[in-house]
Image (cartoon, helix red, strand yellow):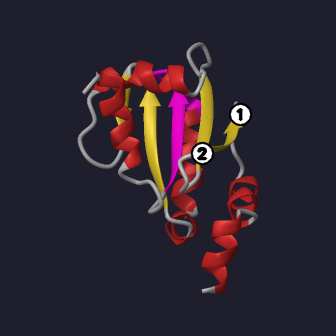
């Protein structure tokens, strides 16, 4: 299997189970630290919306499970974040890119975006 296909399998294992936030930043980004702190304050809301977080910090990747750093460039390329010092990408349960923000993403905007999704509407009814 080609390396890029293996990488997409890392994200695909969350397909239809989780929404994914990918935080892209430079190595010593204070904005990334603020974003992570904001998400930490609202952890219950993230869990309720089935969100998992990956961080691509410079050339390093962290998130659930073991992920090789070799995927940092591939994810930056896929989501067109190659030369940006900071960005957040929201991926829906269907695997589609739902939101890209190049500055701090407010909890209000994140939750409003997710809560407007048809699948989330159904989850809230259930």
Based on the displayed image, in which of its 4 quarters is residue 96 positioned?
Answer: top right
Left or right of residue 83: residue 43: left
Give left or right: position of 74 versus 124: left
**Measuring 71% from the left and 33% from the top, which residue is drawn there?**
103
Of residues 16 and 109, the one nearer the viewer is 16
* Element at label 2: loop
Q: Is residue 80 above or below residue 123?
A: above
Can residue 58 be seen in this snapshot? no
Name the residue tied to disc 2.
Answer: 96
Query: Which of 34 and 55 lies nearest the eye of the viewer?
Result: 55
Q: CA distance from mark 2 to mark 1?
A: 20 Å
Report the number of numbered marks.
Answer: 2
Task: Check if residue 106 falls in the magenta segment.
Answer: no
Query: Which structural element holds mark 1?
Result: loop
* Residue that carries the numbered disc 1 in the rendered image: 103
| Among the two numbered marks 2 and 1 on one chain, the one whose residue lies closer to the N terminus | 2
Q: Magenta span covers which residues?
A: 19-31
Please state the horizontal and vertical placement of residue 93, each as a whole percent of the image. Answer: 53, 57
Percent coordinates x, y for residue 77 in the rendering: 52, 19
Which residue is depicted at the point 62% across and 31% down?
Answer: 87
């Amino acid at each position: 299997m080609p390396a890029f296909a293996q990488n997409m399998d890392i994200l695909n294992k969350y397909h239809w189970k989780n929404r994914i936030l990918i935080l892209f930043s430079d190595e010593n980004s204070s904005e990334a630290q603020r974003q992570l702190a904001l998400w930490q304050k609202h952890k219950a809301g993230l869990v309720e919306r089935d969100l998992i977080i990956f961080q691509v910090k410079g050339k390093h990747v962290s998130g659930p499970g073991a992920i090789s750093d070799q995927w940092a460039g591939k994810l930056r390329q896929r989501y067109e974040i190659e030369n940006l010092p900071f960005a957040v990408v929201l991926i829906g349960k269907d695997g589609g890119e739902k939101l890209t923000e190049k500055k701090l993403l407010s909890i209000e905007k994140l939750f409003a975006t997710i809560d407007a999704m048809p699948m989330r509407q159904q989850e809230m009814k259930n």
